[in-house]
Image (cartoon, rainbow, N blue to C red):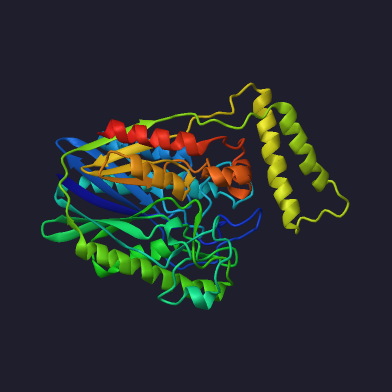
């Protein structure tokens, strides 16, 4: 096989809005703590090529993924289906979703340049293809995640910062991470890590640009191995937060380095323990299924809109009130949905799922913030020896893929987040998403 790596700086200018944590927060960046990168790995076997780009971003809009693919195809001939754009889901970077309501604020000049920068990383990786080998390890990675849906009360800060802290139910989080080590000409050419956890050590109280704990850890490993490029692939982060979240800025920044050090230690162990991984094929496949939405009609949407407008029309309504800002998000979304209904548009819009096989590893990607239970089900049923279920890939406009229990209970992930993107909530993702990802896995065989 041949393998190559490239990267491009995608740090925005200071002052752009940061994404996440609430409606219309006016959370503008004030400085750069760590630069953001698009990092690419190209692989080739028997003439077949594929490229994975990992970005220090909350996500990427599907239109920008399409533009990046077009540029890479023009420059290299790589098919669009063979380029996967993954995002770490850091909430300390710019808002990169065109059309999302209230959860940041996209910066048009930045978004105009972003596809070209991502394409540059991929093109460089293809241009650096050389004979190489891949090595794989799955190593312990503990003391980082906490399941926010099932372990709702986060322990005190001094408790989670102890080296021996573990969540009460670690099985509801990732307790291992996967590490790929790429060698070429006797040197470490690059590495890939895979782990599922929201990178949210820093949040609403913080205003510095960085890739959160996964970005800080990856940058640290790159400094230890000059010339190597490191990619982070986000797993099932939907119901897992880092163990430090929603803290004041000083505490959050101190905790950021500690949690990043825990992840970096796991990566160091993985690089040491990785064993040769024979690569007998490189394959790729992409599908666009339409997942079932809830059966809303215009009357249902108008009823919900009336409830939100009643909040906004109160004489004491104040835009400093979170409830008012949340009602604004819902009202804008419902008006958008009603307009689409009036135009006769289908509310079940296609969603991209994509698979790339690199020998025994299958990257099974969707745009969702996927819940652990869905990842576990796919992993148990996949034919691939090393199936990695990747979230927040290729298109950020789809929100969460909640498990059955959370969907039935309702709340932020299943009910509200689709409205942030202006869509009707999904009806049964726990049934439909595993089926689609397993179909990808089957085709890759």
Does residue 329 appear in this view? yes
| Location of residue 92 with respect to 130 vertically, above or below | below
Towards the viewer: 336 or 402:
402
Q: Residue at x 52, y 71 (%)?
A: 252
Residue 204 x %, y %? 59, 63
Q: Identify the image quadrant of residue 307.
A: top right
Instruction: Report the residue at 19% width, 60% height from top.
Output: 188
Can I make out residue 222 in this image? Answer: no
Picture quarter containing residue 156? bottom right
439 relative position to 306: left or right: left
Q: Quadrant of residue 178?
A: bottom left
Q: Residue at x 62, y 35 (%)?
A: 424
On screen, residue 324 versus residue 436, left or right, reads right
Q: Quadrant of the N terminus?
A: top left
Near-viewer residue (39 or 109): 39
Rendering coords of residue 237 (x, y %): 46, 53
Q: Residue furthest right?
A: 315
Q: Position of residue 384 (x, y in %)?
A: 27, 41
In the picture as drawn, the residue positioned furthest to the top comes out as 344
Q: How many marks?
A: 0
Quarter holding the C terminus is top left
Q: Position of residue 341 (x, y in %)?
A: 66, 25
* Residue at image location 49% in from the left, 43% down from the top: 396
């Amino acid at each position: 096989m041949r393998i190559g790596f490239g990267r491009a700086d995608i740090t925005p200018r200071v002052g752009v809005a940061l994404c996440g944590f609430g409606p219309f927060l006016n959370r503008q960046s004030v400085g750069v703590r760590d630069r953001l990168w698009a990092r690419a790995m190209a692989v080739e076997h028997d003439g077949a090529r594929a490229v994975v780009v990992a970005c220090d971003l909350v996500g990427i809009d599907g239109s920008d993924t399409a533009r990046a693919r077009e540029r890479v195809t023009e420059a290299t001939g790589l098919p669009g289906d063979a380029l996967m754009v993954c995002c770490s889901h850091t909430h300390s970077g710019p808002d990169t979703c065109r059309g999302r309501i209230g959860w940041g604020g996209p910066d048009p000049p930045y978004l105009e340049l972003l596809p070209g920068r991502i394409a540059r990383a991929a093109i460089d990786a293809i241009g650096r293809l050389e004979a190489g080998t891949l090595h794989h390890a799955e190593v312990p990675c503990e003391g980082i995640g906490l399941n926010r849906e099932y372990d709702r009360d986060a322990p005190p800060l001094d408790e989670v910062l102890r080296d021996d802290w573990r969540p009460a139910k670690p099985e509801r989080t990732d307790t291992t991470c996967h590490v790929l080590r790429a060698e070429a000409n006797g040197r470490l050419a690059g590495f890939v890590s895979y782990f599922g956890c929201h990178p949210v050590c820093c949040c609403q109280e913080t205003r510095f640009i960085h890739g959160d704990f996964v970005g800080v850890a990856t940058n640290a490993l790159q400094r230890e191995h000059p010339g190597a490029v490191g990619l982070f692939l986000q797993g099932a982060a939907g119901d897992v937060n880092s163990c430090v979240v929603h803290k004041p800025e000083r505490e959050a920044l101190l905790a950021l380095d500690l949690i990043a050090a825990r992840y970096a230690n796991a990566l160091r162990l993985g690089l040491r323990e990785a064993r040769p991984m024979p690569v007998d094929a490189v394959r790729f496949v992409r599908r666009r299924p339409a997942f079932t939405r809830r059966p809303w009609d215009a009357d249902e949407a108008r009823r919900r809109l009336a409830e939100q407008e009643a909040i906004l029309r109160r004489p004491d309504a104040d835009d400093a009130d979170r409830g008012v800002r949340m009602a604004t998000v819902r009202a804008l979304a419902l008006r958008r949905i009603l307009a689409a209904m009036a135009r006769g548009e289908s509310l079940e819009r296609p969603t991209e799922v994509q698979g790339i096989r690199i020998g025994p590893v299958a990257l099974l990607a969707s745009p969702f913030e996927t819940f652990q239970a869905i990842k576990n089900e796919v992993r148990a049923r996949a034919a691939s020896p090393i199936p990695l279920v990747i979230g927040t890939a290729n298109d950020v406009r789809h929100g969460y893929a909640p498990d059955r229990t959370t969907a039935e209970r309702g709340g932020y992930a299943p009910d509200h987040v689709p409205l942030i993107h202006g869509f009707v909530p999904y009806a049964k993702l726990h049934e439909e998403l595993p089926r689609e990802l397993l179909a990808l896995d089957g085709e890759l065989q």
